[in-house]
Amino acid sequence: MAHDLGSPASGSGTIRSLIPARIDRLSWSPFHTRIIIALGTAWVLDGLEITVASAVGPVLAEQETLALSSAQVGLIATVYLLGEVFGALFFGRLSDAMGRRNLFIVTLAVYLGGNALTALTWGNGPAALVFLYLTRFIAGAGIGGEYAAINSAIDEMMPAKYRGRVDIGVNGTYWGGAIIGTLGTYILLNNVSLNWAWRIAFLIGPVIGLAIWGLRRHLPESPRWLIMHGREAEAEENIARIERAAEASGQTLAPVDDAKAIDIRPSRPHGYLSLLRVLFKVYPSRSTLGATLMITQSFLYNAIFFTYTMVLTKFYGVDEKAAPLYLVAFALGNLIGPLTIGRLFDTVGRRKMISGTYLLSGALLAITAVLFNEGLLNATTQTIAWSVIFFFASAGASSAYLTVSEIFPLEIRAQAIAVFFAIAQCFGAIGPVFYGALIGEGDDPNRLFIGFLIGAAVMAVGGIVEAILGIDAEGRSLEDVATPLSAVTTRPRATG
């Protein structure tokens, strides 16, 4: 086995390391499987949370539960969203400064605590409402922090040849959580007393979280993060541990060429002011790309997903109790897409696949809009059409998260993810309100037809921007895609 150089290079305080190259030479091993299981559940939990909250919302208005008003129920989702934005920005900053491992353990604990406490809400008085909204904010903050810390950790510990498919597949598991949440709440609400059913529903996520708590505690810190922060002894210990796991699975590790070494001069952590300077002064086109991909997919998803049952009930006469079952079919299309075509983002390439999935999903949505407006669809065929559209759109949306997590330097990676996630959530929040107004009482399909065409155009914009500004990151080391800010190199830094 080739050992990391971990030695001073030319220049005071400079470290020369082969750790990025050693990570990228690995083939798949049980260690990588453990990473996916332990960390990938973040998206399962978020999908579950959103679905559970949506399903139990109307129940919380019942007298036998909390007897909330419609406005009070609606505020639950808003507070959770605000919590996600806060959590992404707060924990993203800490993840870049304190490490990935510390934060993906802390954020899970925050989520578990917030969600478990939600189930203890006792009524609708002022104190009870403050308690309810505070716990939803805390749960959202935990999930928001997960996005920043975990996307960074997965990318940094994944060999370059697998990074695209893994990131896209993991992000797509959000819809596995949506399926669990849909089926779980459907069973509970139809078989258990309502006042107990909604409480148990909010505990489904914490049960899953507790199951993977132990796995997370035994994962190593990102060796890339350690070496960038001057902790070469710990970095060597962790990469050696990962290599031993690979060798135990039967791999023979060839020596790494010293020419692939990177020279690092660790610097102080970057705050958000420094981040904004780097994003918009050093990487203006990449920032435009990341923001566009995140905003367009968030707008489309929130617009369709949060008004899905309204379309079924108001335009197709589907019973409210049966509507969640249609969501399962929709979620399956979203789940299968990233899992089946994700590898193409590593083989065919980022630019072709990202722009292709955005443009194709936009075109299919436009065609479906015409069919809808002509009255040629029913509840079943509408669901099939959406499932096909989002088979591609889901892979595209997941690739937006992949893009923002790999095209910026390691020192600001988690914060960059947090910033673009927050921007996307703010724009995405417009979708449900806008489409809800277009749906109205379901008496004017032409208004929704125009709304669908707007959604199609929004996705087309994302595809066109990717085709022009996209980064061909497939199979490339993270350090080649975005040179670390602390790198000592004579090569020109990637900008734009």
Image: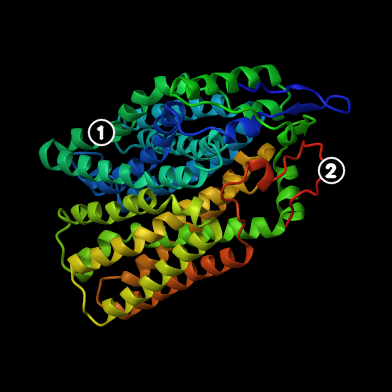
Color style of the picture: rainbow
Q: Position of residue 25 (x, y in %)?
A: 58, 34
Q: Of 46 and 57, which appears nearest the observer?
A: 46
Instruction: Tell me where residue 7 sits by quadrant.
Output: top right
The answer to whether 440 is drawn above or below residue 2 in the figure is below
Drawn side of residue 201 relative to residue 12, left or right = left
Q: Using the rendered image of the protein, determine whether residue 48 is visible from the camera's viewpoint.
A: yes
Q: Residue at x 46, y 46 (%)?
A: 165
Residue highlighted by disc 1: 199
Q: Quadrant of the N terminus?
A: top right
The answer to whether 175 is drawn above or below residue 5 in the figure is below
Q: Of 80 and 227, which appears nearest the observer?
A: 227
Mark 1: amino acid = Arg
Mark 2: amino acid = Thr
Front tag of 1 and 2:
2
Q: Which mark is residue 147?
A: none
Specify the farthest residue to the left: 191
Q: Earlier in the sequence, mark 1 or mark 2?
A: 1
The answer to whether 36 is drawn above or below residue 166 in the figure is above
Callout 1 crowding tier (Cα within 10 Å): few <14, some 14–19, many ≥20? many
Q: Residue at x 28, y 47 (%)?
A: 57
Q: Residue at x 56, y 37 (%)?
A: 152
Calculate the distance from the C-alpha at mark 1 to the C-alpha at mark 2: 59 Å
Specify the farthest residue to the right: 11
Element marked by disc 1: helix
The answer to whether 47 is drawn above or below residue 110 in the figure is below
Callout 2 crowding tier (Cα within 10 Å): few <14, some 14–19, many ≥20? few
Residue highlighted by disc 2: 490
Q: Using the rendered image of the protein, determine whether residue 444 is visible from the camera's viewpoint.
A: no
Q: Position of residue 46 (x, y in %)?
A: 39, 41
